[in-house]
Image: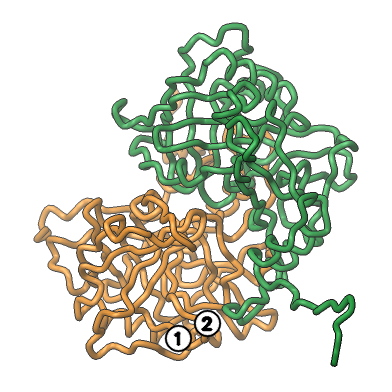
Chain colours: A orange, B green
Amino acid sequence: MLVAIGCAVAASPPKTMGELLASSAPDDWRVPDPANTLYLDLAAGRVIIELAPHFAPRHVANIRVLARAGYYDGLAITRVQDNFVVQWGDPAKPIGTAARTLPAEFTRPVDASVPFTPLASTDGYAPQVGFAGGMPAARDAAGTTGWLAHCYGTLGVGRDNAADSGGGAELYVVIGHAPRQLDRNITVAGRVLQGMELLAALPRGTGPMGFYEAPAAAVNIERVRLAADTPAAERTPIEVLRTDRPLFAQLVELRRNRADEWYKVPAGYIDLCSVPLPVRVSAPSPSGSG
Amino acid sequence: MLVAIGCAVAASPPKTMGELLASSAPDDWRVPDPANTLYLDLAAGRVIIELAPHFAPRHVANIRVLARAGYYDGLAITRVQDNFVVQWGDPAKPIGTAARTLPAEFTRPVDASVPFTPLASTDGYAPQVGFAGGMPAARDAAGTTGWLAHCYGTLGVGRDNAADSGGGAELYVVIGHAPRQLDRNITVAGRVLQGMELLAALPRGTGPMGFYEAPAAAVNIERVRLAADTPAAERTPIEVLRTDRPLFAQLVELRRNRADEWYKVPAGYIDLCSVPLPVRVSAPSPSGSG
């Protein structure tokens, strides 16, 4: 009689992202800081945005002031340009104590306290690319200057022609193929964690640059609030996969060379904006207030 | 008295795509072959697709048979996966004399009769990238095998796990960041020339892989016809910028290094799927029948 003692059956390695994530540990996930998490509430649902204070400290602080003052509440999404951006803001609306414009934060000296996970490969837009604080990022060749990259879901600060003409009263989100030519040309303030489908499916504006021509076409923003300022019962308990853990490196490799049955030829490469950045919404705790 | 004789004022070089296209000559444009142009008519408007017979001859011929037989008419768009694809087809619908499946046409021996305009730079997905027959394309290092690349607007032939399990009865269009990992894994049959905003703004499916869960959510396809089979009065007189002319090379350079007032740092690079492929609809000729 054969008795299995402490017998470990070697499971086959995960072949898909779903299988890999199913094998994740609680420590592979992080809870975004509620003070840096924005809820953009539309009639169709909630868009959740993580702000990037390490890359745009002054702009993020200003966006927080604007959100707390209710500046974004009731604004319209005024621009939806196909394969480019969704944009909102109203240059005529009073902004209270917030700044209308700020010095540009297109790039930043590298902050050693923010883990940077480089991709093994690079691309033509930057000498180094990878993930910093969970967001697609790039660095110069010396590794002393960093910036966030424009990928699907990137949140940016609209500006006019002058570099210092933006401040956060006009924001945009990328809804198409990564417009990496914007990198280092505009302040990136964060990325959408959840709800991209609500922005990306909006009707395209028919005016120049995708602006809505008829005011009635504009989509109303009900409310923009920081998660930190939102009652616990109304918060969305979201978690984001950490980009500085071995599981994320496994995920990148799984996507660089697809191993599931459908794929016949692995690409052997993955570009920065094709790397998935998984999020999950955890079930509210039974003892929670929500 | 000063008399200007044959005086040419040197105009400043174009700084934007609009300025460059305004300087184009009629020969910089081509009229897509009506026998390779599909009209996909939705209630919201017309999507115009150019087929790629040089890259997928058997699939394109089969799609033509399916269109002529009215197979696509009345089908539903059944899948809209955010940042990925829109897909339609009905595996249960009779397909008449068309083939249900065909041998894969993932790559092709290079056809010397199709001009290939390489980009100066390459990317991690292929040793050579550029434009073949006006479509984003790639080649192996030897330059003997070619394939079409998955960019925003690429039309592909859905298949199951087996390489030869597609035929054209299920088609998809890319609506997000270029999924280049699909290159060489699936048959590409063409690209959308106009009307992407009608597909890209469709509500996302909420089921797995973006399939619509409620049949009522599916979007009806009124009709798919070849331009060649469409009465002249109902055709759209579209022209496409040629990719094998000097003006196109100027366009690529203008976009590789933006020179307009807004940009502060030129990228010095452009990835394959960020190169615009302009189309224009010409006004119907006063003597035309339409």
Name the residue beneath numbered marker 2: A161
Please name whichever residue, A74 or B9, is drawn nearer the observer in this view of the structure.
B9
Residue B129 visible in the picture: no
Name the residue beneath numbered marker 1: A165
Residue B170 to residue A54: above or below: above
Residue B150 to residue B7: above or below: above
Q: How many marks?
A: 2
- Image quadrant occupied by the N terminus of chain B: bottom right
Disc 1 residue crowd, few under 14, some 14–19, many 20+, Cα 10 Å: some
Tell me which amino acid carries mark 1: Ser
Q: Are marks 2 and 1 in contact (CB under 8 Å)?
A: yes
User: Label 1's element?
Assistant: loop
Identified at 89% across, 79% down, the residue is B5
User: Label 2's element?
Assistant: loop
Disc 2 residue crowd, few under 14, some 14–19, many 20+, Cα 10 Å: few
Task: State the image coordinates of residue B100 (x, y, percent, origin top left).
Answer: 60, 14
Tell me which amino acid carries mark 2: Asn
Task: State the image coordinates of residue B138 (x, y, percent, origin top left).
Answer: 77, 46
Identified at 26% across, 83% down, the residue is A65
Identify the image quadrant of residue B32: top right
Compared across the picture, whether A16 is left or right of A145 comes to: left
Residue A217 visible in the picture: yes
